Image (tube, grey):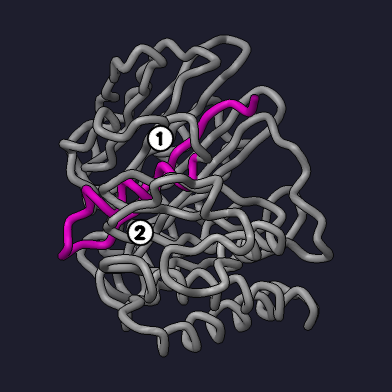
């Protein structure tokens, strides 16, 4: 699947719920959802935005179209910076509220969504909701993937792009950061995605070298390909420029992948594949340099067990640089 960027709605008061509702409806219609499902996506967006306005600090709603295993839908991520939810089960129970309302917001969101997850600490709360066409959830896949991809400015396209290729044995991902920002950066990163044809090459190093040759007409980009082979228990990585990848072990250890200097499309001399041990309970995080390299999950109890989209959203919230496009891709084997 070739990934789309998120549309971001900053939520400061109740009036922002109307904008969130319109964005959700438009995305739903753009991917072919019928009026009933588009209305459902709009209601979920409105409920999430209303909750952010009532209870949260520095709330924002991220929305994007999704296409998982042939099923189209809309993904919504509600993100805030506290004060957090003391008892999540109570917050999901209809009739429970700390703000004087009927308390049906999160309960309604869960009922209306095919996928739902939540994580909350004093640092903030993150809610994931996915709405699929015909209430048919995406078919089970061997890997679960979550991505946050956001432009530095609302009026610009995101200069980052990403794509994922899944099959029963492997998960492959390409993350690209076009040089600079705006339209020309986006053109470079999307050209790299279009040029990624892994079936034509013997390995990921050859694939990245082919991308390098294919985007010479652009301003250039940083890029990396990762491949998880669950049978061989290995993660393979090849990168040019400042796309980072790390494997998190269940015991908390982290293994950083090695990337080479250069710019895809302009100057890249070495395309070398590195291999790292991979275990069934490992977690992969790949990101552009819009995310600080000093991120960690140590201060977030239980986060590593949440949906990969929740993990990506928390990293985006707490470790992104404010003056750059940012993409965070998180992948793990399905349970």
Task: Say which quarter of the image contains residue 62.
Answer: bottom left
For the point 20% across and 62% down, the residue is 324
Label 1: how many Cα within 10 Å (few below 14, some 14–19, many 20+)? some
Figure label count:
2
Query: 271 or 184, which lies in front?
Result: 184
Which residue is disc 2 drawn over? 160
Label 2: how many Cα within 10 Å (few below 14, some 14–19, many 20+)? many
Residue range in magenta is 308-335
Disc number placed over residue 303 in the picture, else none: 1
Q: Along the horizontal axis of the image, is 96 left or right of 148? A: right
Task: Say which quarter of the image contains residue 284.
Answer: top left
| Position in image of residue 187 (x %, y %) | 38, 68
Query: 248 or 204, which lies in front?
Result: 248
Name the secondary structure under disc 1: helix
Q: Along the horizontal axis of the image, is 3 left or right of 116? A: left
For the point 22% across and 42% down, the residue is 242
Q: Is residue 163 above or below residue 297?
A: below
């Amino acid at each position: 699947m070739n990934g789309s960027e998120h549309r971001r709605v900053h939520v400061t008061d109740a009036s922002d719920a109307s904008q969130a509702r319109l964005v959700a409806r438009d995305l739903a219609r753009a991917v072919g959802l019928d009026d009933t499902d588009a209305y459902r996506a709009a209601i979920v967006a409105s409920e999430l935005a209303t909750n952010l306005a009532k209870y949260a600090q520095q709330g924002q709603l991220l929305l994007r179209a999704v296409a998982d295993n042939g099923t189209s839908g809309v993904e919504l991520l509600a993100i805030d910076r506290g004060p957090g939810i003391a008892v999540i089960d109570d917050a999901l129970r209809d009739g429970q509220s700390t703000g004087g309302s009927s308390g049906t917001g999160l309960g309604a969101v869960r009922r209306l969504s095919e996928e739902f997850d939540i994580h909350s600490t004093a640092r903030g709360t993150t809610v994931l909701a996915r709405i699929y066409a015909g209430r048919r959830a995406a078919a089970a896949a061997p890997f679960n993937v979550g991505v946050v991809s956001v432009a530095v400015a609302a009026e610009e396209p995101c200069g980052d792009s990403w794509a994922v290729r899944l099959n029963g044995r492997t998960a492959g991902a390409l993350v690209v950061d076009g040089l600079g920002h705006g339209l020309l950066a986006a053109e470079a990163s999307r050209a790299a995605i279009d040029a990624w044809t892994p079936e034509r090459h013997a390995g990921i190093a050859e694939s990245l070298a082919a991308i390098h040759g294919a985007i010479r007409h652009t301003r250039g980009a940083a890029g990396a390909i990762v491949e998880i082979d669950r049978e061989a228990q290995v993660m393979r990585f090849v990168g040019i420029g400042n796309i980072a990848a790390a494997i998190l072990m269940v015991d908390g250890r982290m293994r950083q992948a090695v990337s080479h200097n250069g710019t895809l499309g302009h100057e890249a001399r070495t395309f070398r594949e590195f291999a790292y041990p991979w275990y069934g309970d490992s977690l992969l995080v790949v990101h552009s340099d819009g995310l600080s390299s000093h991120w960690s999950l140590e201060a977030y109890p239980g986060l590593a067990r949440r949906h990969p989209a929740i993990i990506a959203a928390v990293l985006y919230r707490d470790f992104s640089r404010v003056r750059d496009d940012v993409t965070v891709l998180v992948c793990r084997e399905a349970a």
